[in-house]
Image (cartoon, grey):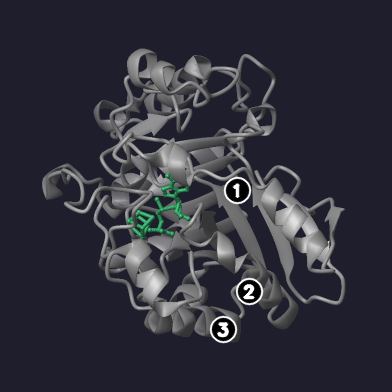
Amino acid sequence: MKKDLVDRFGRKHDYLRVSVTDRCNLRCVYCMGPEGIQLIDHKDILRYEEIVKVINAAAELGIERIRLTGGEPLVRLGIEELVAKIAAIPGIKDVAMTTNGIFLADKAKVLKEAGLNRVNISMDSLKAEVYRGITRGGDLDKVWAGIKAALACGLSPVKINVVLMKNVNDNEIEDFLRLALEYPLHLRFIEYMPLDFHDEDWRGKYLPLEVVLEKAEALGLPLQPVEENDSSGPAEMYRLSGAPGMVGLIHPVSRHFCDKCKRLRLTADGFIKPCLYWQGEFSVLPFLHDNVELKCILQKALDYKKERHAMYTENQGRQENGIVRGMSKIGG
Ligand code: SAM
Ligand code: SF4
């Protein structure tokens, strides 16, 4: 067996996104319908020791960075125990989390002490009512408390994910840019991805991120492109003159970054997904008792990985890929 996770296109994979639950305390409009999603049965969700076994095998194949996601990772009980176990795995250099931040104020310190290095927090509006609308009920004050707790306890960097949507939050680009001028936050604007077609009007909300560059220029706040230390990430990074924070643009739709993709995903019910956008997934469940077999299934998933995603053509996504998992079931 090959030692490293190198795919057919020469991409060496060192990053695993782990969805720890499909449950969520919010119902963001871009992620799911108002009724939520069909939940995975509790008994089918991987236990922490099972997740650790998969990560152990992955680390032996060169995975160095783990991101916990969901659903909402902070709704899973004792998540800090999982963080501590992962941080102790030989070869794992970085443990991160993507969260909606609602429960972060209470958890940031204990997560940091357990070994979490950094956090991405989704906050799509700076206006309480708009935020409540996008998330179908979320409380912006709680997210802010979470962001402040994350900064205070030394999780670094703290990144803010903003899915930009036409006529929803695109009139807040300036306010978000000014946030990077005020706080050491990385603001990351993300294009709306049509993942599971729960939103038939996604095209009506979709905005290419050039609008951010144009708006910044018009405001006299031009964005200077920079190479991020971690150049493997999906974001194009920019510096804002005089700002402690940074700005990132993630354009999965208008400019795919598949050639730089180094990531695999583990779903909460135990499937390795080589690509967010292709249906193919490989169950780890039959192999949890055997580290060598786990490594084989990781390799097999990688061998399936395509050169690039196919989200440009709605019909291709729907018919050929037969996408069945939405974002909250994969973890973004
Ligand atoms: N619940 C956590 C959160 O919201 O941060 C983690 C899971 S969520 C699925 C991970 C990321 O996916 C979030 O930053 C969210 O904004 C993003 N996301 C979800 N649906 C999306 C979509 N249709 N297009 C672009 N980003 C999306
Ligand atoms: Fe929940 Fe995150 Fe999806 Fe929003 S984006 S509904 S917070 S999983």
Q: Nearer the viewer, residue 301 or 160?
A: 160
The reply, left or right, for residue 285 in relation to residue 59 is left
Q: Where 183 sits versus 314, above or below?
A: below
Which residue is at 48% across, 56% downward? 167
Which one is closest to the eye, mark 1 or mark 2? 2
Res. 60 in view: yes
Q: Is residue 40 above or below residue 143?
A: above
Q: Which residue is mark 1?
A: 91
Q: Which mark is residue 153?
A: 3
In terms of sequence position, does the residue under pointer 3 or pointer 1 come before the other?
1
Q: Position of residue 304 (x, y in %)?
A: 48, 15
**Residue 294 location, x and y as percent?**
39, 29
Within 10 Å of disc 1 (Cα), the crowding (few <14, some 14-19, many 20+) is some
First in sequence: mark 1 vs mark 2: 1
For residue 69, which numbered disc appears in the image?
none
258 relative to 199 in the view: left or right: right
